[in-house]
Amino acid sequence: MSQTTYTTWGTPDSHCQLKLVDFKAKENLISHETQGLSNQHLVVRRGKPFKLTLLFRNQSLNPRTERLVLEVSLGHLSESFPVQFSDKRSDPQSWSAKIYPGDIHPQSVTIHICSPVLSAVALYNLVVHIETVQNRRSYAVGSFVLLCNPWLKDDPVYMPLDAQIKEYVKSDYGVVFMGTHLNVRKRPWSFGQYEPGVLEACLTLLQVSPQHLRNKDNDFSLRADPVYLSRVICAMVNCNDDLGILEGKWQGSYRDGFEPTEWSGSADILHQWVSSNYSPVRYGQCWVFASVLCTVMRVLGIPSRVVTVFNAAHDGDGNLNIEECYSSTGEKLNFNNKDSIWNFHVWVECWMRRPDLGAGFDGWQVVDPTPQETSGGIFCCGPCPVAAIQQHCLRVPYDTSFVYASVGANVTRMIVRNGLVVERKVDTECVGKLIYTKSIGSDSPENLTQTYKSKNTEATCAASPLQSTVLVNGKVRYTGYTTPLSRHVVGEARGMSTGLEVSLRIDGVPSVGESIVVCVTVKNQSSSPRVLMEHLNAQLKEYNSHPQESFWKTHNEVHIKPGEVLLLHHAILPSEYESVLAADDIVNMAVVIKDVRTEERALAMQEFNLRSLKITIEIKGGDSIQIKKEHKAQVSFINKLSKTLHGVVLTVEGSGLLQGKQEVRMISLQPEEKIEKTVSIMATSPGTKLLMATLSHSHRANMVSRSFHKVPVITA
């Protein structure tokens, strides 16, 4: 972006003519905390004055015979306002422009322009009018971008602490938490708001929204409201109803696009969307949708953070209950119903006041762009106040009942045999087990669970349309099932006793290449000895769907004395799972214990993910690099498995650091053998970049491992 715009108009006469406009780019960008957001436009924040200097061609402005009038416009909307030679306080609800006594110079004046605090977020055109009694000269002097202002108290996105603004607005680097609550793994993400063209892409997103295409003037008028902005942008991040950015896909082939796991930053996605004339980028899943949404919101000045809910419920039928069915031998069954539990689900929290609801619902709002259910007829979710979830105010807009179910539904697990439910158990603790976001100034997680979960000992669901539920001790208790069981379950066995207590535990965090050690605990609560059958079953599953067929199972007869507690240990050897499981895969492990005589059954289950092998990434000379200077990075992997890997490929890539992908191949990699690659990297823009390394081999289509390295870019 040039600091000045040179313009020459008209022929000389007795009145001043505008020759040059200096947008004071450097000074304004520093003052408005917008450095690096654009090299095409002046970017400023609403409600805060910015400067521009007018230089005149022949003579200085004569305040006695000439006056300056500025005009800002958005589409067909425009507003004119005079430039005042005064330091009196202006109306914060209106546009104003002032020239202070020290700002008048021979042949130039400096104007301080201030927008209303509730101005639309948009690219504005600016016209300068020089008026006399006889005539008016008009000069189209350029444009500027106006963003939300979280530093300003009167702005509905105001955030009180600078450390929060630095993390949730200015930081272009984040961490997404994934996996399971037993083994949380971190995936860095480059939000990329300082990459060239990203701000312009975010503004374009608003311009091609259905709301704007349908009624431009109405859309511009509503863009002052972050609630409105968040709903428009949330819907536009997915492509289900519009010219949105991302197409979602959760199974099948990804050959006509990119696997969601291949993305490590938002800039590449936004650039591809713009360059393809707004064709959807293929493909995204929840963390990709959320991270792109977080980028757009931060660019527009709305504080935002990526949040992960572990064991998130997708309550398609709205009854706050998720049903899961298991066979009598412990295999989890897939009934293709609308309800499911995702091992993790990622959404965004955006910070804003809610004048439509009242101060009690100000603060963090859930905005979820992953297309799951419609809201107001379109695929978006939120903004939903986190405070409303904690207080069980389920009628508060927007989509509070759906978000509440995501973190607070119950899970009913059933053992089904010959169409009959032979065991039923309600789990009130599983859903929303852990809710994480990145800590301020650190890659470690901040636990948000209690901001969603009620601390009240007793509450009622009076605000909920679900008449079949009450809340006791902050948990949903069912007074009756409002929907029938899945079509496969046709009845229920009666007279089930409670004489067995069973639990299942995974020892440690298993890594690829190590044995998976399982401990089943059985307690005989009856006064008689018992003969039991133990059925233990393991299945591979995707994080957001039901498991696949079993890859390992065992059956054992167990004798237990009255009141005895037995610990039953099992190990799944690498040779028994390596053809099925890869790094970060999730396993559903379940055990069914059956009393041979009474046929009483008890179920316990646990889902966990395997820890991946480490790829080492090292920046020569330290982790930080200087902008526009070449640096070396070394990437290496040592085969810690007990077997030889064949057709090994080590790939290195990094948006803003490398052009394309670089890779090295080996026909085979023996145990303890190393593969490595040295690459030259250079950053042309400021911010935090990510190097990503992936190792794959011919034995499995899935990657063995993927690692990331954060690379801060500093100016010389």
Image: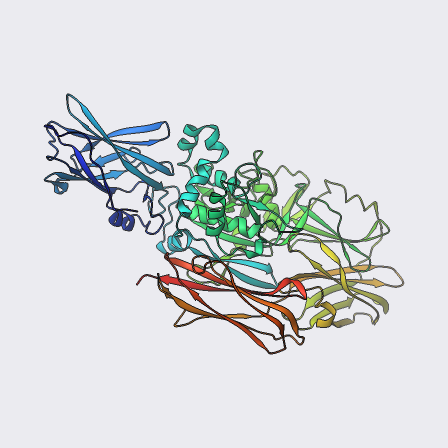
Q: Answer with left or right where residue 541 lies relative to residue 26.
A: right
Q: Nearer the viewer, residue 407 or 85?
A: 85
Task: Give the quarter of the figure containing the C terminus.
Answer: bottom left
Residue at (61% x, 75% y) in the render: 640
Residue at (84% x, 49% y) in the render: 419
Residue 580 in percent (x, y) is at 71, 64
Q: Answer with left or right where residue 701 lies relative to residue 599.
A: left
Residue 552, compared with residue 302, is above or below; it is: below
Residue 313, compared with residue 57, is above or below; it is: below
The answer to whether one can see residue 454 in this image is no
Residue 554, compared with residue 404, is above or below; it is: below
Q: Nearer the viewer, residue 440 or 374?
A: 374
Looking at the image, how many numbered discs can be counted on the residues? Answer: 0
Q: Answer with left or right where residue 545 lies relative to residue 46.
A: right
The answer to whether one can see residue 272 in this image is yes
Residue at (69% x, 51% y) in the render: 411
Image color mode: rainbow
Residue 487 in percent (x, y) is at 79, 43
Q: Nearer the viewer, residue 36 or 645?
A: 645
Residue 442 in percent (x, y) is at 44, 63
Among the 4 quarters of the image, the one containing residue 461: top right
Residue 364 in percent (x, y) is at 47, 47
Q: Nearer the viewer, residue 673 or 376?
A: 673
Which residue sits furthest right? 597
Which residue sits furthest top? 134
